[in-house]
Amino acid sequence: MARMKFLCDVERCIECHACVTACKNEHEVPWGVNRRRVIVMDDGQPGEKAISVACMHCSDAPCAAVCPVDCFYQTADGIVLHDKDLCIGCGYCFYACPFGAPQYPQQTAFGVRGKMDKCTFCAGGPEEPHSEAELTKYGTNRIAEGKLPLCAEMCATKALLAGDGDVIANIYRKRVMRRGGRPQSWGWQAAYGQNV
Amino acid sequence: MKLIKKSGTTATSSRPGILGRAIGRRAFLQGTGLAVGAAAVAGALPTTMVKKAKAARSIDPKAEIKRVKTVCTHCSVGCSTYAEVQNGVWIGQEPAFDSPINLGAHCAKGASLRNHGHSTRRTKYPMKLVNGRWQRISWEQAIEEIGDKLLKIREESGPDALWFAGSSKASNEGAYLQRKFAAFWGSNNCDHQARICHSTTVAGVANTWGYGAQTNSYNDINKSKCIVMCGSNAAEAHPVAMQMILRAKENGAKLVVMDPRFTRTAAHSDVYVRFRSGTDVALIWGILWHVLENGWEDKEYLRKRVFGFDKVREEVAKWTPERVEQVTGVPREGLYEVAKIMAENRPGTFVWCMGGTQHTIGSNYVRAYNCLQLALGNIGVEGGGANIFRGHDNVQGATDVGPNPDNLPGYYPLSEDGWRHWAAVWDVDFDWLAGRFDQNEYDDGKGGKVKPMFSPGITVSRWIDGVLEDKANIAQRDNIRAVMMWGHAPNSQTRGPEMKRAMEKLDLLVVIDPYPTVTAVLHDRKDNTYLLPAATQFEQSGSATASNRSLQWREKVIDPLYEHKTDGEIAYLLAKKLGFADQMFKNIKVVNNVPEPESVLREINRGAWSIGYTGQSPERLKAHMKHAGHFDVVSLKAQGGPLDGEYYGLPWPCYGTPELKHPGTHILYDTSKHVMEGGGNFRAAFGTEYNGESLLAEDSWSKGAEIQGGYPQFDHKLLKQLGWWDELTPEEKELAEGKSWTTDRSGGIIRVAMKHGCHPFGNAKARAFVWNFPDPVPVHREPLYTPRYDLVKDFPTYEDRKLFYRLPTRWRSVQARDYSKEFPLIHTSGRLVMFEGGGEETRSNPWLAELKQEMFVEINPADANDAGIKDGQWVWLEGPEGGRIKVKAWVTNRVGRGTVFTPFHFGGHFQGEDLLHKYPEGAAPYVRGDSTNTATTYGYDAVTMMQETKTTLCRVRPA
Amino acid sequence: MTVKPISRLGAAFAFAVLLSACDMGVVVYEPGVYKGDPDPIASQQAAAERSDALADRAGSAFADR
Ligand code: SF4
Ligand code: SF4
Ligand code: SF4
């Protein structure tokens, strides 16, 4: 059985934000909500590194553990999804998530939080795949079509990899072997309890 | 399952507005209008309104989805993409893994192309200013009124009183029609972005070795062992090129980045060299000094293939490490290391972009880069080359066949021969065409007279002076009185406040563009100002030439949502009104006023022999798009399949007729290949000798050439001399008699030359010594606004000139004053990844606009402390000519002490004031800001009139 | 005891009503267990069916051709 994971190769990421806009494009995520972000370390200094971050679809998802209404589930291939009909926008998952993935659109003039939105690994949500309801609430469902997340598929330098953990780890390891140095699978320890 | 039921929730609690309904095209349009309208507010209001910004889309899982292949319009990399279209609506964008150029990848801009399909932030209808307010009018009325005004101005002041900017964002066909339009109107007063982008490159490299273009390709960088980037920030300007660069690096190549700013590209380098902006010649000579000192140059290569290198040696000898450090700020070891890396890792490629071109001595920079590469034997080899990354998606194509003031399509000169060639291609009478031009004679600036038809027109960098300069001082009958911005952002040109005045002085101002652009709002005009909505390249088909000279064909994705028309149709309508459509479109198929792109490309194929734009028929280009997956990523060569052996996109030169099946030229001047396999050598474009010294190649020729040694360009005489004349068919002979390979419209001379393995353009040496330039050997000259005024004495700029491209042009008189005390900081500018050019289009795309919502200046912590500025604070940046901009301070070490950086994509503010109220309603970009170029200054290259945007001065203070 | 067929039917019906009432009205709360709608693509079977296609896709998307 495949186990879906993300891997961002920091040696290749160039901070171009294609992953961010690809996601906006694919799912029409509204202004102010970012399922994916690019985080920069040592901005403007030698050693500057960037990494693209979204929900990592953790093995033991901390968000699911703290959700008071139990709206999270994990698909058999490891994608962490949630039911927006249940979500009450409480924000607990945001505090639990090591990657800051959950996002909340501001819903009213008084700043009450809307229902949580996060990266779906382009796998929609608990609705009929490709239905109007799914599209509206969660975006498209590429996984059901046999496609991978668009953010990774469109990455400028193929820094961002998405797919079965073994497959992408192989691609990545080959690169690391060619260029030398040690693998730096940022976030894997926290998300999947292991390194590449 | 332990628990199945949940209580109380209905399936869809919040389904906003139109999303619940099945949506037809019209409703879709309205829907997005509402939804995206809210996104606009999102930018301006507190985030409380943000939720409504969700745009609308409906996908019917059962209805047919059409896949259309197109190419990103945001830079010269040329990334293909698949558009998914349902019921005329662009509903999805899929990666084109089959393209050998991008393998599916995009940058932020390319990954958000689909927004073009439903964006409402555009000029939607023809409009005109009536007493200072925009009013919608019909296309008929617009063409009538504009046409009448133009005819009146022509009557009073002659055809040169109209100046227009065409576009590097037009297709080849659109750009070609723009040039043809100017010709048939009777003027050379047209230009486009290449002038202010790579004009110094084009002039510099063409004068060195033959063609004004990137010699290799992004893909070929995979073969490089060393990549030196100088004044190129590919990670932001050409992001997908970084895919190839980082792959090469993984394979062991060394990456050297030289730039005054520690760019996002520099972040990936093995060696980064920071130097003072405006000192590249000193920097390069500093490197070459070490190369020559250590004997690392390729002596055999220099003997066989380079002319005049000794003159370069003399100049370089003066640039000792001490002197280089004094001028550039880089110590000896730094450049020794670069020289050593380059010497030990061959082939190496040299990449430059705007950082190397936009200078008063930009053409010197370019030729210094060339000389360094020639010394190392790096030109004309795989993995080497001068990899000049061009800017806009079709700036190469528009340079090749588009609206240039100083040449005709295919770089044919503005001489009688050049004009006669094109008149013949166009099938019009030369005398009729000549009669369209002003019949006076103009001062040629060299003490003689010149006919307007043969006199280079005014450039896009200087049109404002064509308007503002005293009539007595300019070399045309009258000032410029009418301007059309046909796909051009004015905020990409320097001297904003003067531009505002120029716009206000005009009798007629027309914007032909998908967007209102800054031209719609910068000035305080009340009338005689028009906006014509132009279609994007997704709303039409046509070809575009990527930086590597590959031509790619775009299929039309969607019909325009509003009243947008293609550049071709607009050219046709205007020409019809002005009375020359029948002549101009004589051999072009026009359906419902729309010229068919295929038919236009065939006309280009019939005329542009000089640069091999002749083999790329529409059929061949379409086949390349279809079988893109057959091409190898490194060599760009098709492996098997119907296109076996051809290079992707038939990179020009693709000589001869399409039937000849030339494969295109991936690597220019590569002697290791037969000319029919894309091989070549340096061009014999400058005669056969200079002062008694031969210019032809010695002991060097392309594989399989029957003439083993140098030879001149082919013409009818040479063919006869060689006894090859009778290999022409009788029909070919008829057209070839008395002609050269560039003017023989049968293509016979080319065919026969190549049959004998010879290159039609001859086989010569590259010129390290370019005697026809102001500085035959590149020398360092201090910028007009220099922070090191103490060096002006040793490195002064040029003398002023009375006439240059029809205008008085100043150098010395500007440099005469020292501004460095009042304006102590170097002001340099550049690109951001999320925006393109003047930025109107990309700042109108919410997915991009959200990424950078404020104009800013990068300032070093030391300079910030000196000026009392905190990170994130509003500041005034003031230039020495009086322009000032209000921007956010970004305190960072990305810039060194003494240098500040601003991005040039902002517009829509002027000196602190938001011009939102001046845009047609609902057409303003989401993100606006003060334009860099409001604060930039005078300064132009002495060969091409390139503007100086990379080195000027400023001061920054808290706002 | 003799029960008329009709009342037996009635009892069964009443029981069924009771059962369903129970089903509708009572929520057995089990913390940490997903309470939302089922997702058709989440099952073992669905995941197994697509795993080859997704592995192929990763090859064409990410390998440096
Ligand atoms: S996987 Fe899909 S939803 Fe998640 S960040 Fe990428 S594009 Fe967005
Ligand atoms: S698209 Fe790729 S290279 Fe660009 S920011 Fe995202 S992960 Fe980095
Ligand atoms: S802007 Fe350039 S690099 Fe980015 S997607 Fe478009 S063509 Fe590719």
Image (cartoon, coloured by chain):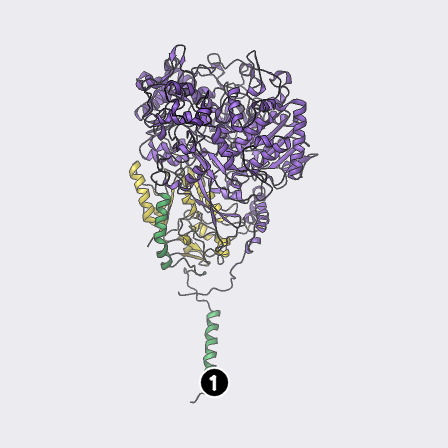
Residue B697 vs residue B923, the one in the foreground? B697
Q: Please give the name of the residue rendered at 45% of the width and 80% of the height, measured from the top-left corner.
A: C12
Q: Which chain is purple?
A: B
Residue corresponding to mark 1: C6
Q: Quadrant of residue A19?
A: top left
Residue extending farthest top: B692
* SS type, badge 1: helix
Q: Residue B879: which quarter of the image?
A: top right
Instruction: Estimate the x, y position of residue B420 in percent, counting from the top left.
Output: 52, 23
Up/down of B927 relative to B212, above or below: below
Q: Is residue B5 visible?
A: yes
Report the chain shown in yellow. Answer: A
Tell which residue pokes out farthest to the right in this image.
B131
> Farthest residue toward the bottom?
C1
Please identify which colour was used for chain C in the image.
Answer: green
Q: Nearer the viewer, residue B355 or B611?
A: B611
Q: Say which amino acid is labelled 1.
A: Ile
